[in-house]
Image (cartoon, helix red, strand yellow):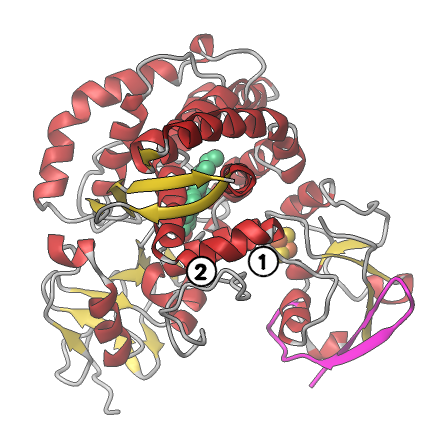
Amino acid sequence: MQVSPTNGIGADRPVNAQDPFDLEILANPYAFHEELREAGPIVWLEHYGLWGMGRFEEVHATLNDWQTFCSSAGVGISDFRKEKPWREPSILLEKDPPEHDRARSAMTKVLSPVAIRKLRADFEAFAEELVEQLVAKGEFDAVTDLAEVFPLKVFPDALGLESGERDYLLRYGNIAFNAFGPRNSLFEESMAEMPEVAKWINARCDRAKLSPDGLGAEIFGFADEGKITEHEAGMLVRSLLTAGVDTTVNGIGCALRSLAAHPEQWAALRDDPTLVRNAFEETLRYDSPVQTFFRTTTRPVDIGGVQVGEGEKVLMFLGAANRDPRKWENADQFDIRRKAAGHVGFGSGVHGCVGQMIARLEAEVVLKALTKRVHTLELTGEPTPKLNNTLRGWAHIPVRVTAK
Amino acid sequence: MPTITFITPDGERHQVDAKPGISVMQAAMANDIGGIVAECGGSAMCATCHVYVGDDHADRLDPVGEVEHEMLECTTSERTGSSRLSCQIEVSDELDGLEVYLPESQV
Ligand code: HEM
Ligand code: FES
């Protein structure tokens, strides 16, 4: 390929004219993803004047090269060096090493596998209770009756948040993840709700409001040790509330949708529950709940022969990389037995999801509880997608189950 | 290409070629070495890529980083002075001939 010497203004770079945040594409992104992957290793998205990446190899390499692809200029479409962020930037997600490391190491401790093991018994108990009720009902909405109910109880409980009004958390997550995208209708609707919801959230991130035995209090413990400031501790609690609820709701929802839509996969899981954790990995690959994040280049860089300039926004399509046929055999097939580890559904590298072990635990206990009590799981109608500028998920999944 | 040998708890030896720049965990995965789970794909978040590096090789490695140290507290098999996360060891020509011992269990 001929290489353009200019900052992506050359005529020979791969170009795509579609709007990736168009509501129809968000509802079903896979045809667009294929176009993007086939166009090239990195593609100029004309609609916004920025770059998009859909192939696994380049997305993975980008996630693992924070020196060239920074997060500190924002991981959404807005460039913090040119525009004022809508909220104070996250001290985790929107910082680069070495600044990033302090908060990261505190969070790694709070959310480590050992810390998470302590949550298992409570999570299991609630999953079993909830599934028992739903099986008795027979027909239910796998999102509003299960995928939302479960994380909304166990996660804020683990954090030490007081109970009540927890649907604010879903609204906040929806706002924050829409805010990474362009100023489309989803963004505007979210911003209209923002003042009310942010007020509720900020009040909950206060030390005095958190129970003394939760993960939130543990984060404030790092402030007492002088590892982070009191203000930063509050910011980290906010990060968990932003990043830890909608993502798992969508993750569990995507798993249930895929299992209900593929009866043979459900049957395989029910008959061999040791596949539960792998089934969730496959879900994250097949229907990635976090679809996209941006980076900003810190220097000119050559990507597969395409010249990208400094200070340019690059949109990584995690969901597209996770279905790249260059990496995955039968990429469009949902197969709970495949080796799905190594997908980029949780990102990769220094910003790789710090909450991934808790997300896996939540999905595991829900799916395991289902395999114990449910014989058949089937859709009774078309699921309704839940549109968001970053997240992929379902608003409603009507299902019917029969008891074992 | 550098070679790395994985030694199972039963003493079975598996020698693999590994491209410089990838991690020891990735070399194991690419060669279907059982005994390394690597659930998090190398983000130092899961502690299921735990290995023991013999004393005769340990000083060839970079020291244990802060996050790796945290995560080594979470291994299922006992942590010893030789414990490392294989996802945090980058293969290089200097590591040619590295021998790593697999633990009894990862999860
Ligand atoms: C299925 C559920 C989840 C998915 C798919 C997911 C996905 C992701 C992804 C893709 C990133 C990388 C962001 C980037 O590279 O810029 C990330 C980072 C992060 N996630 Fe998750 N996540 C999930 C659940 C959670 C949970 C439950 C928590 C909290 C306990 C959490 C907290 C975080 C935080 C704090 C970061 C930022 C880490 C950093 O920048 O160092 N996530 N997540
Ligand atoms: S692969 Fe998860 S810690 Fe190494």
Q: Is residue A89 visible?
A: no
Residue at the image point whose x is 41% and y is 75% from the top: A330
Residue A97 located left or right of residue A75: right
The relative height of residue A190 versus residue A197 in the rendered view (above or below) is below
- Outermost residue to the top: A208
Chain name for mark 2: A
- Outermost residue to the bottom: A1
Q: Secondary structure at mark 2?
A: helix
Residue at the image point whose x is 63% and y is 77% from the top: B20
The Cα atoms of the two marked residues, 2 and 1, are separated by 31 Å
Q: Which residues are magenta?
A: B1-23
Front-lying residue, B93 or A27: A27
Q: Is residue A224 magenta?
A: no
- The N terminus of chain A lies in quadrant: bottom left
Residue on which the image places disc 1: B42
Q: Is mark 1 within 8 Å of ligand 2?
A: yes
How many neighbours does mark 1 have within 10 angstroms: few (below 14), some (14-19), or many (20 or more)? many
- Which three-letter amino acid code belongs to the residue tagged 2? Glu
Measuring from the top left, give residue A84's x and y in whole percent: 19, 38
The relative height of residue A155 versus residue A257 in the rendered view (above or below) is above
Name the front one of labels 2 and 1: 2
Quadrant hosting residue A21:
bottom left
The relative height of residue B83 versus residue A58 in the rendered view (above or below) is above
- Which three-letter amino acid code belongs to the residue tagged 1? Gly
Q: Is residue B50 visible?
A: yes
Measuring from the top left, give residue A238's x and y in whole percent: 38, 27
Q: Is residue B10 magenta?
A: yes
Residue at the image point whose x is 37% and y is 15% from the top: A204
Residue on which the image places disc 2: A264
